[in-house]
Image (cartoon, rainbow, N blue to C red):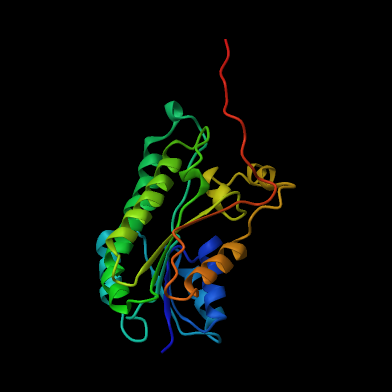
Amino acid sequence: MQKTVFITGATSGFGLACARRFAHEGWNLVITGRRSDRLEALSTELAPLSTVLPLTLDVRDTDSVQAAVASLQAPFDSIHTLINNAGLALGTEPAQRCDLEQWHRMIDTNVKGLTTVTHALLPRLIETGTGASVINIGSVAGHWPYPGGNVYCGTKAFVEQFSYALRGDLQGTGVRVTNLAPGLSESEFTLVRTDGNQDAHDALYAGANPIQPEDIAETCWWIASLPPHLNVNALELMPVRQAFSALSIYRD
């Protein structure tokens, strides 16, 4: 039986690259995102490689998520791997100057959206059993905070702890859970965060040889295809040119 992967945020970045990577392995794909035109284009692109179901979906909409999952029919009803990729960062200002609506949107997407999708799919993953996987896309920001990260860092810290706790709850079901935490990665991430500031995007990645979406897709594929008795609890990835800095000190 062909395996099925359910990918959120499949219209760009990591999610798009994951869809292409799993399609090349012949997996059935359930690809979700808010941009219908991109989903349809991706579905057409991947149709020669796999069976694809595009679902226009905003993970913040609980009713829509639950209805979409309930509507899954063969060959998409048996889920082997969930890749919780949908997420975003908004703003770079210190907390005292941040837009509260941006904070709420990050929480609604990165925390509430991820948990809503996971909750809806858990019965199907448990039914699949041994070897099924939940891959949560976290961030090094969930473990290593930085100025301007405020709520974004908090949401990714949640993803890390939720992944560990979920792993404990699922013990005995055969379902695996991984917190995959990338560092500096080149995608639409910074454009979204800076409201389309191309100069900021270019400056951040210039000369850094950052992680590419295809790198994360390859990592997700490796995790999902490991022997079923193995679980990668957490995996933190950085480009070689990114490392740790000294703690900051404010001086009079």
Q: Is residue 12 above or below residue 70?
A: above
x, y (%) of residue 29? 45, 78
> Could you say where residue 150 lies in the image, as x and y percent from the top left?
44, 36
146 left or right of 209 in image: left
Residue at the (34%, 60%) spot, across then down: 167
Q: Decide: is 197 above or below 100.
A: below
For this rendering, which residue is in front, 11 or 136?
136
Q: Residue furthest right?
A: 207
Residue at 53%, 71% (x, y): give it.
221
Quarter of the image for residue 83 reads bottom left
Q: Residue most toward the top?
A: 252
Residue 69 in sight: yes
* Residue lying at 52% horizontally and 45% vertically, measured from the top left: 193
Residue 12 appears anywhere in the view: no
User: For residue 100, what is the image quadrant?
Assistant: top left
Q: How many numbered dots are placed on residues in this image? A: 0
Between residue 142 and residue 167, name the one nearer to us: 167
Q: Quadrant of the N terminus?
A: bottom left
Q: Nearer the viewer, residue 61 or 75?
A: 75
